[in-house]
Image (cartoon, rainbow, N blue to C red):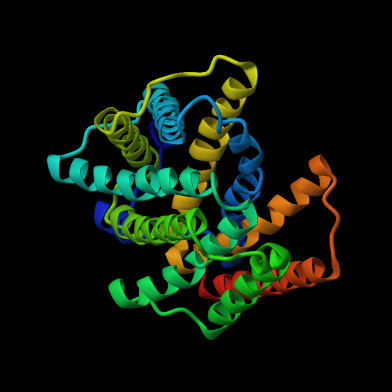
Amino acid sequence: MTPAPGTRIPPASVLAETPLPTASPERRAGTDLLLFAIPSVIWGTTWLAIKFQLGSVAPELSVGWRFALAALLLAGFCAARGVSLRFGAADHARLALLGVLLFGLNYVLVYRSEQVLTSGLVAVLFAMLVFLNLLGGRLFLGATAPGAVWAGAVLGVSGVAFVFWPELKAVRGGGAEAVGIAEGLAATVLASAGNLFSQRLFGRGIDVVPGTALAMGYASLLVILGCAATGVRFSFDLHPSYLVSLVYLALFGSVVAFVSYLTLVRRVGAGRSGYSAAVIPVVAMLASTLFEGYRWTGTALAGMGLVLAGTVLVLRARSRAA
C-alpha cells in the first residue's frame, strides 16, 4: 500500500527506536488468571477419565497411548498453522528430557501409585509440588517469590490436607502402600523438575506449542519402548469408555491444559504456576460432588476455604509482579 501524496515517512532509524505497544498490567494479569484457571479446572476433572483407563490396559501403556495421541494432535495443529517443528539436535535432546520428566516417568508413577493409594492421598502428595517449585526456583533459577506466595503455598497445601484428612488418618505406610507413597513422591519430584526445566527451556525462545508437541512425542516413544523392554503386554481397549476417556485425556488433559500451563510457566515462572497443584484437588472434589454425590464435611469445607485464601494471595502477588 503506497502512502498518500505529501505523507512524511519517518526514517528507518526512528521506526526501529519506536517501542512496540505492550499489554497493560490489568490485561496481562487477566491473561495469567485464564492460563491458571484452564489447567486447574481440566486437571481437576481428569481423574474421572483416568478411572476408565485403569483395567485391561497396563497403566504405563495407557500413558504412552495418551501422549502419542496428544503429540499427533499438536503436530497436526502446527502443520495446519504452518508452524515449524524443526529444531537443532541440542534442542531435540532438551525436549526429550522435558518429555521424560513432565510427560513420561512422572505420569507412569502417578498411574502406578493410584493403583494402590486413594486418590486423596495422591492429591496430597502431589500438592507438595507447590513447595518444590518455589524451592527449586530459588536454588536453581535464582527466582525469589514474594512472601505472599509462600504464605499462599502454606495455606493451599494445608487446605488440601484438610480436605483429605480422613484418608490421611487411614494411612498405615506398610507394604504396597509404602511403595505407592514412594512412587507418588517420586512423581512429584519429577514433575517439579519438569516445571523448572520447562521455564528455562521455553524462556530461551523455544515456542511452547511445537516444543510441547515434540516433548510429548518423545515421552510417548520412550514409555512405549520401556513397556516393550520390561515385558508389559501390549494391548488396546476398543470399548467406548476407554476410547472417550483417552481422547479427553489427550485433547483436554494434555494438549489444552499443558499448553496453557507451560505458557503460564514461561510468563510468571514455575513457582507461582505450581500453585495449581493445590487448587486441582478442590476442583476434583467439586466434580465428585456433581457426579458421585460427595458430601462435604466441616473439615473439608475448612480446607477448601484455606485453598481459596491461598489462591487469592498467590494471584494477587502475581498481579503485582506483572
Q: Residue furthest top?
A: 238
Q: Give the residue at x 81% y 67%.
A: 301
Image height check: is 17 above or below 261? below
Q: Is residue 226 left or right of residue 296?
A: left
Q: Is residue 220 left or right of residue 302?
A: left
- Please tell me in which quadrant of the rendered image residue 85 appears: top left
Residue 84 in the image, given as x and y percentages of width and height: 29, 31
Q: Give the residue at x 85% y 45%.
A: 293
- Please tell me in which quadrant of the rendered image residue 243 appears: top right
Image height check: is 79 above or below 217? above
Q: Residue furthest bottom?
A: 147
Q: How many marks?
A: 0
Q: Residue furthest front?
A: 175
Q: Is residue 181 left or right of residue 42?
A: left
Residue 18 in the image, given as x and y percentages of width and height: 36, 60
Q: Give the residue at x 48% y 64%.
A: 129
